[in-house]
Image (cartoon, rainbow, N blue to C red):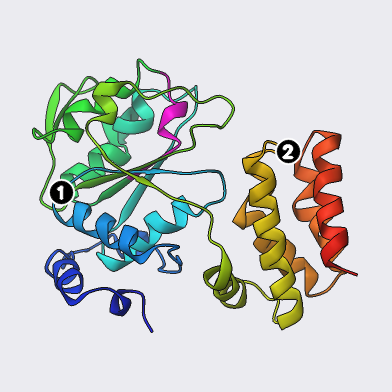
Amino acid sequence: MKLLEQLPKQIQTLVEQNKNTNTTNFDNMIRSSNYVPHDLELFSDILVALSQGKNVLLKGPTGSGKTKLAETLSSLFNQPLFSVNCSVDLDAESFLGFKTVEYENDKQTIAFVPGPLVQSMEHGHFLYIDEINMAKPETLPLINGALDYRRTVTNPLTNETIHGANGFGVIAAINEGYIGTTRLNEALKNRFVIFDIDYLQGEELKSLIKDQSSLQDTKQIDAFVKLSSDLVKAADQGKIAEDGASIRALLDACDLSSFIPPKRAIKRAITSKLEDEREQVVVANLAETLFE
């Protein structure tokens, strides 16, 4: 059953009413729909918020599927998705665009190349801001106007005022425990509706492994589902870093296990990413109890 068909009719109708019907020149930026929600009620609430023009903040650990979720929202609403990956080096040009030199009839001119914020606002598309809490505090106020009722930004590079076209929406993601992140200030946080995204577990994770990895051995899939549960528990208890419980890393291990022994696959895809030797031992011990 398709994802949208699993939701209440009212939600299905709301999404259909808010689908973008004009994606000329941007069809290649509509992302794929392969996210498996761990909570259909939570997923429905996100769809409602976006349909009503709210800014959505996805809060969850590394590898919990926040980016996959944003891509699925792009697909369901038929909305091109522009992306900004935040870092401490993020500047105004990363959001707004930059000036460049062009030549027309041998005459030199200065042209402005619009960035993801400008393009998503002008065309009424979605903007995905990944790890928004890794950006420098002085950078984010540039987009405050785009996030509130005004839906406008003044571009300091051109002095032009940009208005968000109908359909423009912002999806942001944070991992509060990740190294290098800072707390979002209250003014910025208040511009979002916040949703907690957790790791996929149980039957949903089993379906995800079957659908999105090359591993098809039922016994091994069950063992990987149990391993994931144990890794999440170990991360909650502080025995391993959150990276060790990443679903993305688990899927990599499942892929490798189609051709090499599972314990070796786990070492390559999961254990080797952990820098602390004690954490590596924890993962190795868990794998030892589940795989021959």
Instruction: Give the CA separation, mark 2 to mark 1.
Output: 40 Å
Dot label at residue 218:
none
Which of discs 2 and 1 lies nearer the camera? The answer is 2
In the picture, the quarter occupied by the N terminus is bottom left
Quarter-of-image position of residue 100: top left
> As rendered, which of 66 and 81 lies closer to the eye?
66
Picture layout, residue 218 above or below residue 171: below
Q: Amino acid at mark 1?
A: Gly
Residue 81 visible here: yes
Residue linked to disc 2: 239
Q: Amino acid at mark 2?
A: Lys
Q: For mark 1, does the 10 Å Cα neighbourhood hold few (<14), some (14 to 19), or many (20 or more) residues?
A: some
Residue 2 image position (x, y, % from top left): 36, 80
Secondary structure beneath dot 1 equals loop
Residue 262 image position (x, y, % from top left): 83, 67
Residue 131 counted in the magenta span: yes
Picture layout, residue 244 above or below residue 48: above
Residue 146 image position (x, y, % from top left): 19, 33
Side of 88 where 156 appears, left or right: left
Q: Residue at x 35, y 15 (%)?
A: 138
Q: For mark 2, does the 10 Å Cα neighbourhood hold few (<14), some (14 to 19), or many (20 or more) residues?
A: some
Residue 67 image position (x, y, % from top left): 45, 52
Picture layout, residue 206 above or below residue 42: below
Side of 37 where 210 appears, left or right: right
Picture layout, residue 77 above or below residue 59: below
Residue linked to disc 1: 53
Residue 107 visible here: no
Quarter-of-image position of residue 37: bottom left
* Label located before the other in sequence (2 or 1): 1
